[in-house]
Amino acid sequence: MTTVIPFGPQHPVLPEPVSLKLEIDNDVVVGALPSLGYVHRGLEKFIDTKDYNQTTYICERICGICSALHGITYTKAVEKLFDAEIPERAEYIRVIVGELNRLHSHLLWLGLFADGFGFESLFYECWKYREEVLDVAERITGNRVIHSISKVGGVSRDLTKENIDMLLKMCDSLEPKIKDIEKVFVNNYTVKQRLVGLATMSKQLAYEAGTAGPTLRGSGNAIDVRETADWDIYKDLGFKTAVAKEGDCYGRTKVRIDELYESIKLIRNAISKLPNGDIATPIKGFPTGEAIMRTEQPRGEVVYYVKGNGTKNLERLKVRTPTFANIPSLLLMLPGVRLADVPIVVLTIDPCISCTER
Amino acid sequence: MNMTDILIAALVIFVAPIIGCLYAGIDRKITARLQGRVGPPLLQPYYDVKKLLSKDNMVVNPSQNFYVVVYVAFLILSLLMLVFRADILMIIFVYTVSSIALIVGGMSTGSPYARVGSSREIMAILAYEPILILYALAIYLLTGTFKLSAVVDASTPLLVYTPLIFIAMIVVLNIKLKKSPFDYSTSHHAHQELVKGMLTEYSGPGMAGIEIGHFYEYVFLTGLIFVFWAVNPLIGLIISAAAFFFVTLIDNITARVYWQWMLKLSWSVLLILSIVNIAFLYFSEATIM
Amino acid sequence: MMGMLNLVLTNISRKPATRLYPFEIREPFKEFKGRIVFDPGNCILCGICQKKCPPDAITVTKADKMWEINLFRCIMCTECVVGCPKDCLSISNERVKTGAKETVKVVVPIVDKPKAPKAASK
Amino acid sequence: MLENTIEATEIKSSGELLKTIEGLKSDGYRYSTMICLKANEGHDFIYVFEKDNKLKNLRYFVKPGEKPKSVSGIYLCALLIENEYQDLFGLTFEGLAIDYKGHLYLTPNSPKAPLA
Amino acid sequence: MIENTVMLLIAVPILFSLLFVALPKSLYKYLAWAFFIIGVALSVNLVLDGTGVVEIGEPNFAMFENIVLILEVLVILFIIAVSAKYKNWPTLALGIISAAIFAYTFTNAPHAEGASFNIDQFSQIMILIVNIVGTAIILFATGYMDEYEEHRHLNRQKTFYFTMSFFLAAMNGLVMADTLGWLFLFWELTTLCSFVLISYNMDEEGINNGFRALALNLVGGIAFSVGIILLATNDIATLSGIGVYAGTDAAAMAVVALPVALLCIGGFAKSAQMPFQSWLLGAMVAPTPVSALLHSSTMVNAGVFLVVKLVPAFAGSSLGTAIAVYGSFTFVMCSALALSQRNAKRVLAYSTIANLGLIIASAGIGTPLAVAAAIMLILFHAISKALLFLCTGEIEHTIGSRDIEDMSGLVKKAPLLTTLAALGMVSMLLPPFGVLLTKWVSMEAASSNPIVIVFLILGSALTTVYYAKWMGTILSSSMDKNAVHHKKPETYFPLSFLGLAIVATSILVFTIYDYFIRPQVEILLNTAPTVSGQAGQFTSEIGAFAYAAIFVALALAFVIYFATRNMFTPRTAGYYMCGENNMEMDKLMFRNGLCSYDKSSVSNIYLQNTFGESKLTTLGYAISIILIIIALAGGVLI
Amino acid sequence: MSLAKSPWIIHVNCNSCNGCDIEVVACLTPLYDAERFGVLNIGTPKQADIMVVTGSVNYKNVNVIKNIYNQIPDPKVVLAVGACASTGGIFHNCYNVIGGVDQVIPVDAYVPGCCPRPEAILDGVVAALSILENKKKGNIKGKEVKLKGKEVPSNA
Ligand code: SF4
Ligand code: SF4
Ligand code: SF4
Ligand code: SF4
Ligand code: SF4
Ligand code: SF4
Ligand code: SF4
Ligand code: SF4
């Protein structure tokens, strides 16, 4: 007889409301049917009533965790419709805020993940370091997690000298701390017991399953949109894609830790190259045309499709978020793991249901 | 039973939960400090119990709280037997009653999480029960009797001849206190795949009963460790305090493991450790009397 | 295991990282977007702020000379601050009070009259 | 007409669509997403594929009342977005790997086909 | 008069078996009540008569001896005939070997002048079990068999009751007979009854399993009869004689070691010890009353009964140690096997084998304390197991399944039945009940032998696990109330009676000890364990079992629970289903992704990959056979 | 003061964008350490005192939050965290949004902000404590919320 239990939506180990109907045989999951819709608000319809500027704030609230990158991607997509030339300085500030966003998001994930395998003190440790990032972000943008800094045409706040000093200080103090927790994630015996070999996807499988971000890179696919021509500023900053070959939860963890270092490096390089000048160009008129914009969010690649029809409202906005791309891989990874591993496997894609359902 | 015995019994019944409560408070405080935070007040477990007692008694199965009463009653009994230096084997059996009462109580609610938690906890029995009895056996081999009074009157501390069993007992302590890495059936922190495991459906007074039971259990388990150096109460206390600190420390530096892993650990490493120790005692015919 | 042991032992030997809020209150950063402050003095009840506000937190009723903000709906986006032609709106680093829901209703003084005492209520 | 549109190959029939997509899969493309737009009473689908960071788009017009074929047989990961469009546009896909029957996001008592 | 009681104990069941054949089905109920009452009266009467030896000499002896011989011939002929009919060649071969041995004994054995029945305290205990528990089970059967047959479209109840009653006669004879030849006859008669009852369903499975039981018991029987022949060369013809002879000196003990070991093998086969365990598992196809009567509480006890009676012949010798190791090995192995089973009757079967193994281990240890434990365990185990088997049968009729997983929520459907079953399980694994008390005694007794004690420790942990699992399952509430099974007095009276018996015997444990066990151990080993029973404690020289304190704690728990229950008015709420339980009808339903509803269910952990039959059985066979060979070799050489 | 010293919370994520959620979690982490007030994030409603809700209510989760509310033993307090939970926030007129939490269950205190700072949430918890105490004194019971309530489509 199989065990059938509901898992979520209100479940202490799930940070977000998603529900799984788990079928378990002999302590091994044999079937998992996800149930979505607990955070479906209907944002793609919402643009009918909000103008393209206001939509920025809606997009930022697709998800509160990588909110900044949602805003940046959306504004960049709309800028494509306008064919607008954006001041360099604004782009650099966007990168810095975006990478700050990634830092806090990955630290957050590492913490929740540690909590997923019952390692409370490690969870607290990660979140303690995350607060340093948040403090800096708050002073740059005025808010802790929903930064609202990017707007169509540029950014709304400039980086002050003070901000830059703070950023550099944060980078310096964070780096050794990340090394500390890296040691735990990579070497701790019990952690390895739980992660190594869990929910392995081969390189090919991860690629074909359409996964994105660390889920994809954890299986050895060196694919990161930050390297594409869509937003070439990253190339100037010496960005390098982090990959791990393992393909299991352990590999995905390593990728995320490597990306923390990468983000710190990007922030430092961006600061050193930060050009002077305006932070925004005025935009006139209403958007027309179609555009696709992709950026790399903490959880992976996001695809924005915008279509304007010459009115102040967009005609269509479609967001393919990374979690949306990663959820099908859960269907592949869950069968065969133990019940105790379900939270880890669910967390390993860093699920963000609110962006999946919008 | 004379007057002093009754007095001692009453004292144990009333003082043990206070000590247990303090222990729980200290444990939470140390944990908090290990995690770099201030943590709750020392008396937090007491506040929790008081709060729980004043809450609604919400049940899914009208008889679920009966098992809590059995759990607490048998914990008190095993503690009393420990204090009165009864037969250690007997104490372990009585203690098993309380563990089983809690497990059956969890299962009796019928909640899927509680049932999964309980079946994991049953597996924990498989892991620690043999060790506990081997511990009793070591006492017998060293004193010629299962009665604990012999250990107290002994000339040499138990620990001298039972270092390997002591190690195994620390792990048992870890399992019994449901601390990481063995907090898979229920845990004091709610963050696990089974919600609150065995105790998911307990609320208000029922949960308070369980917490009080935990207090007794803390004291009882301290007692078991204390026996290792019962000849000198002070050292005994220090050793049990150190053991508890160690368990708290381990709690904070490990991830939760699978119950399968625990079974493997116990039936390979711990059992072999204990059996080697027992074999040594058997062949060396050591005695501590 | 050693790595974590090191971390927790360092933690226990140091002062806890906890900020003792509410017993010790950290000064809010000056950049912090805490709440929208309305200065009715120059307001012309043009309604731009209402139009700009994404969550429709602001309601401007010209007939009643009423400017209204639902502080529990405002998302601190500062669109209204940027948009106001008369610079009546600003952002302060004070937080809105937690507790009961709060709506600020301000009767705007007639434009050409000198400053009247502002009436904030509810 | 709009300027500024994205490049996309027009596909005429659903058979051709599935064939092309199978071809893309064997070429090593991965399924990125699919965009659904209301157009001329029917719906326009834009399938987005990606390989080596380059996008390849297919455009396919779904006639009113037509039941589009699901791609989830070729790319499993297509099932989520197709189910989403069943919910939001009231479409019915044929051959879905897991068919949520319009209840991926919406429940029986929520608004029906809000984007249609 | 003790002679009369002895005769009645054999005659009355035979009379009843004939009555069952003669009278119509509608009267069975009354017959069974009468049988139960008479059984209780007779056995109590025997106990009141006290112990003694009943000699049967000339002139009656010749007649009886002839009856015995004729019966033995008939038994062998029956075996040969039935195995030929069903073309079961191994059984046929064994039957022919038995016939040959019988022919050899018949021609070569020295002529005996008399036979004796030896009624000691042990026999009294066994008679109490057989005639009280046994008749209670038959009473239960009258409420059970109609439904059983209805399911299977059978109509063989006359055979059933005839065999069951006849079996009681044979069993009574077995536990009283002292003359080895007669003992052997009763022994074979019980085997035969068992065969008939196992193949009761007359389907292929039943017949195959019946033959397996027959064959394995014949192997035991052959060992037994060879043992008898060997003993006869030393002029030993009675069971008690063996002990007397071996008690003279070490040399005498060595002389009888081999025949004693052979007798023990007979006992092992009867008690389904490894490697003979498969017949008992196969026997579970029989109707549940059969399992309760023959295959847990009485017939299989004949094997351990014999082994315990032989204690004086191996106590303290290396043969004893070998037997102890062997028994404890069976205990741990079968406990592990029970862990992986989800068929309730198989769990009980393994548990039975394990407990018999524990008895054998205690007997093997051979100290007074251990022997006392062995005898007590026979008593307590018989009552608890009978109750558990009957409960399983009744559960099966209530829910239509004997799968442990299907039993969740039983407490809502049949609360009394569940309570009784839970009592049965608790009595098997927790203090203060008798079985645990004896387990405790045997552990304390075994603590001088490291291998045995380690086996016992592991086995007892495993026992706790599989019973706790089962108990939790039946006690778990599922909140959906289904139709309550109607309660028949014939079924619920025996159940409640056995339940009460468990509690009563556990409370009176020290009285029982004083009255039966101590004298018996003195008979067997000439010394008695120094056990005292003051202050509600069962105190031996190395420990104390405070059963009274535990009863008090238990009673207090009840009192406190009922006293405080109304202090906190309970409010019943739905299960926590992560917020997704919206169905009013079944509270375990939750909404799934397709917006329809699923029922949640949880199965227990069975560790089939570690403790599954396929993994362990071969290992068990190998080790147990090696241990038996060691026992034999030890018996002969050392 | 027995209740006010040991508030156990259950955190229900309704329709939130995660912004509020992570701030609620942040309250429990060392920097804010809500456990100083005895706060434990307890997984099961059966043991909770304070229900912390983030995000607005939609048609799928409306029954979930009602169920959970009903399963918290009295006395209990509901704390709505963030603009969404308080008023529906920026999403208040989305088609799948019913509105703030107070549309379906009684809410005792609100925390403003999008997203609210951990300090604000701590304030909310502290406010909830006194409400809890009052409810205990006045023996105020939460009404059982019926499961078939507001789930009628808004555009029907
Ligand atoms: S801390 Fe994380 S895992 Fe735990 S309840 Fe909160 S969100 Fe869930
Ligand atoms: S991927 Fe997740 S975290 Fe990132 S924006 Fe989307 S929802 Fe938020
Ligand atoms: S400020 Fe601008 S929008 Fe407002 S009333 Fe004047 S002209 Fe109109
Ligand atoms: S800050 Fe934004 S949300 Fe708040 S009132 Fe102004 S425009 Fe509205
Ligand atoms: S506040 Fe500014 S924008 Fe709003 S109505 Fe007044 S003047 Fe206009
Ligand atoms: S009650 Fe049902 S199961 Fe039992 S005999 Fe009758 S028909 Fe068969
Ligand atoms: S107990 Fe089982 S096998 Fe026996 S009659 Fe009932 S249902 Fe049939
Ligand atoms: S209030 Fe703001 S941060 Fe909180 S859930 Fe709503 S949109 Fe997200």
Image (cartoon, coloured by chain):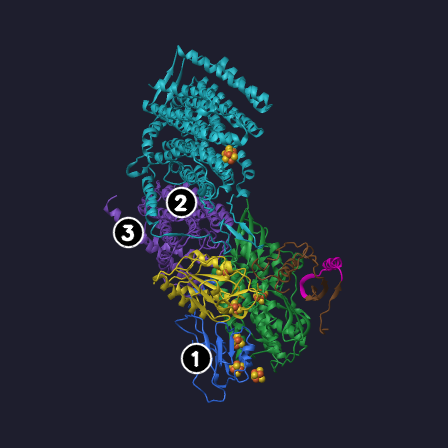
Chain colours: A green, B purple, C blue, D brown, E cyan, F yellow
Number of the label disc, if any, that sits on residue C120:
1
What is the CA distance from the residue labelled 1 to the residue labelled 2?
68 Å
Q: Where on the image, by quarter, is ligand 2?
A: bottom right
Q: Earlier in the sequence, mark 2 or mark 3?
A: 3
What is the CA distance from the residue labelled 2 to the residue labelled 3?
24 Å
Q: Nearer the viewer, residue E633 or E393?
A: E393
SS category of the residue bearing label 2: helix
Q: Are marks 2 and 3 in contact (CB under 8 Å)?
A: no
Residue B153 position in % (x across, y down): 30, 46
Q: Nearer the viewer, residue E296 or E311?
A: E296
Seen in the picture, residue E129 relative to D109 is either above or below; the reply is: above
Mark 3, other Cα within 10 Å: few <14 / some 14–19 / many ≥20: few
Seen in the picture, residue E415 relative to E191 is either above or below; the reply is: below
Kindly indicate the quadrant of the structure image that contains residue E516.
top left
Number of the label disc, if any, that sits on residue B11:
3
Residue type at mark 1: give it.
Ala
> Within the magenta stretch, is there residue D26?
yes
Residue B77 position in % (x across, y down): 34, 46
Mark 2, other Cα within 10 Å: few <14 / some 14–19 / many ≥20: many
Q: Which residues are magenta?
A: D12-37
Residue type at mark 3: give it.
Leu
Give the chain letter at badge 3.
Answer: B
Quarter of the image for the N terminus of chain F: give it.
bottom left
Give the chain letter at badge 1.
Answer: C
SS category of the residue bearing label 3: helix
Return the residue at label 2.
Answer: B96
The number of discs equals 3
